Image (cartoon, helix red, strand yellow):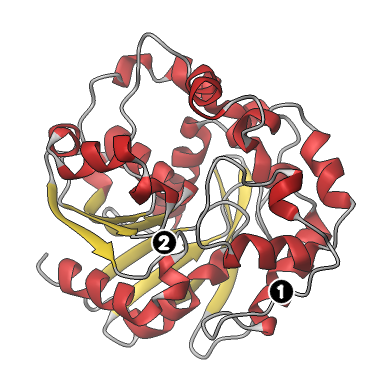
Amino acid sequence: MALDGVTHRTLEVNGIKIHVAEAGDGSAGSILFLHGFLQLWCSWHHQLVSLSRLGYRCLAPDLRGYGDSSAPESPSSYTAFHLVGDMVGLLNALSLPQVFVVGQGWGALLAWQMCAFRPERVRALVNMSVAFMPRNPAMRPLEAFRRIYGDGYYLVRMQDPGTMEAEFAQMETKFIIKKLLTTLDTGASSFSKEWYGTTEEVIPLPSWLSEEYVGHVAAKFDETGFSGAMNSSRCLDLNWELMAPWASAKVIVPTKFMVGETAMSCKSKAVQKYVLEGDFKGDVPGLEEVVVIAGGAHYIHLQKAEEVTEHIYNFFKKF
């Protein structure tokens, strides 16, 4: 997917190869963009172009397991420490002591972890769609998901390597990507047979989503497969064990959080109470703003690109 002013290179970091898209001269600072599940560097194409024109050096890597970056075979090679280590290694390779960070979805989870482990590398944070999740010392994450959503929840079903990959192999990759991006009301049924429906369905694309974009993402997953993308979720309980020393770690960097009003992470009563009624601020003392994007769903950086970009710019320009 070619974009004006965007260049690409692959760097050796943390024992693997990380592909990164870059744009901008950095006169206003550098921004590291962290993509979410079943996305690639190009999910940030709007922000790369717009914010680079405002003087930011924009860096959008394919995370470990995705796209043109390395995809180690073992699921245990995708812990939070591997992923944060990749990003710190990338910044070191680019001689960037500190950057702004933007995360969405699973990339937001990585951003929270990066801020907890290495806050001195983050100048300020804009995170989207997934709120900070404090470690519950009494319950592993997968057990919590089972209790809340049942054994059919996709994160639970995804734990057996190869099972969901086999399901995906029965469907056209373009269908999977279109279904994922156009489902505005996500929930516990995501990636279930009921959620997929008939694979013969013709999925019309909204104005903010192009066939070119879907085609680029689908072609890359056809090339790489899905295991690398799924392996991070297979480290949920392992991360829980390894992160015990950081159980009470707070996110102290200046932070803005955004969520779409129809997203599961916004509609959940428990999440609403946590985010809007004070406990979130206790875990993220650096929290300065919470923004609910009207009409927005999970992929607000794509769906509401101009609005989201403006929010990012207005927050980062203060620092």
Give the residue furthest to the bottom: 4
Q: Nearer the viewer, residue 178 or 119?
A: 178
Disc 1 marks a residue whose amino acid type is Ile
**Which residue is located at x 19 percent, y 37 percent?**
280
* Quarter of the picture holding the N terminus: bottom right
Q: Where residue 82 is drawn, which disc sits there?
A: none
Residue 53 horizontal/vertical position (percent) = 33, 88
Identify the residue under disc 2.
Answer: 33
**Which residue is located at x 40 percent, y 49 percent?**
108
SS at circle 1:
loop
Residue 70 horizontal/vertical position (percent) = 68, 49
Whether residue 286 appears in this view of the structure is yes
Q: Where residue 203 is drawn, which disc sits there?
A: 1
Residue 151 lies, with reference to residue 172, above or below; the image says: above
Of marks 1 and 2, the one in the foreground:
1
Q: Are marks 1 and 2 in contact (CB under 8 Å)?
A: no
Disc 2 marks a residue whose amino acid type is Phe
Residue 100 left/right relative to 144: left
Q: CA distance from mark 1 to mark 2?
A: 28 Å
Q: Earlier in the sequence, mark 1 or mark 2?
A: 2
Q: Nearer the viewer, residue 266 or 125?
A: 266
Give the residue furthest to the top: 138
To which quarter of the image does residue 250 belong? top left
Residue 246 horizontal/vertical position (percent) = 30, 21
Q: Nearer the viewer, residue 118 or 250?
A: 250
SS at circle 2:
strand
Residue 2 horizontal/vertical position (percent) = 62, 85
